[in-house]
Image (tube, rainbow, N blue to C red):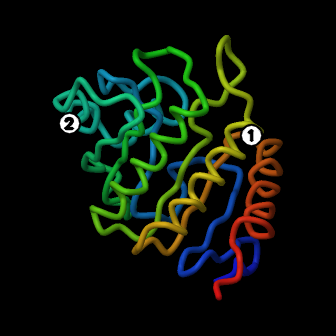
Amino acid sequence: MTGTRTGDDVRFGRTLVGATAGDLLAQPVEALVLAANRRGLLGAGPAGSVRIAAGPDVEREAMAQAPLPLGGAVVTSAGRLDARGVRSIVHAVIAGALGDASTVPTVRRALTAALAAVDAAKLRSVAIPPLGAGTGPGQLAAASVAAALVDEAVAYLRRSPTRLERIVFVAAVPADVPAFAAAIERARSRSWKQSA
C-alpha cells in the first residue's frame, strides 16, 4: 500500500492523516488525546480546555486509575463533550507529575498506547495535539514533536490492523502546522512503501 494525498490529508491504508491549526475541541472526531501525567491531573493548555468543557468527571476518572504508567495511556468518558460527538478522552501519559518535562521516546510510547486505546474502544477518528511541545523550560520543540508523532502514528498504522479512519494533528499555533505537514509528506514518500 502507498500513502496517497486526499485534499490536505494523506491516506495511509484506510486512515487519513492530516494536520490543522485551531482548537482541539472544535475537531469533528470521536476521541481526543491529551498529554497526561501519572496522577491523571489535567494541566494547562489543551488539557485545561478539555477539563473546563468536559466537566470535572473526566479528570476524576483519570485520577481514579492512578498511578498511570509513564508512556502508557488510559481512556475516560468525554463528559459533556459527548454532546459534540466526542465519545472518549485518551490520556497519553508523557510526564511523571504535572508540569514535568517529557522526552521524545516517552511521547512516542504514549502515542502508540493512545492509538491502541482508541482502536480498543472501537473509535474511528482522533485529534492529537503536539504532546510535550511548548515554549516553557524543558518543553520539547514543536518540530521534534511533530516528526516523532507522525512517524509513530504511521508506524502504528503499518503494523496494526486498525479501525481508524482519520488522525488529525491539531496545533494551537498556526506556525507549527508546516512541521506536521512536512512530517506527513516525508512519511508518505519514504515510510509507506509499495507492498509486493
Percent x, y of residue 106: 51, 32
Q: Is residue 34 left or right of residue 40?
A: right
Residue extending farthest top: 137
* Label 1, label 2: how far apart the Cα atoms are: 29 Å
Residue 80, placed above or below residue 9: above
Q: Nearer the viewer, residue 162 or 165?
A: 162
Percent x, y of residue 157: 52, 67
Residue at 58 percent across and 52 percent down: it is: 152
Q: Give the residue type at disc 2.
A: Glu
* Quadrant including the N terminus: bottom right
Q: Give the residue type at disc 1.
A: Val
The residue singled out by tag 2 in the image is: 61
**Quarter assignment of residue 144:** top right
Q: Is residue 118 left or right of residue 95?
A: left
Give the mark nearer the N terminus: 1 vs 2. Answer: 2
Q: Few, some or many C-alpha atoms within 10 Å of disc 2 (few <14, some 14-19, many ≥20)?
A: some
Residue 37, placed above or below residue 163: above
Residue at 39 percent across and 24 percent down: it is: 37
Residue at 42 percent across and 39 percent down: it is: 92
Residue 173 got which mark? Answer: 1
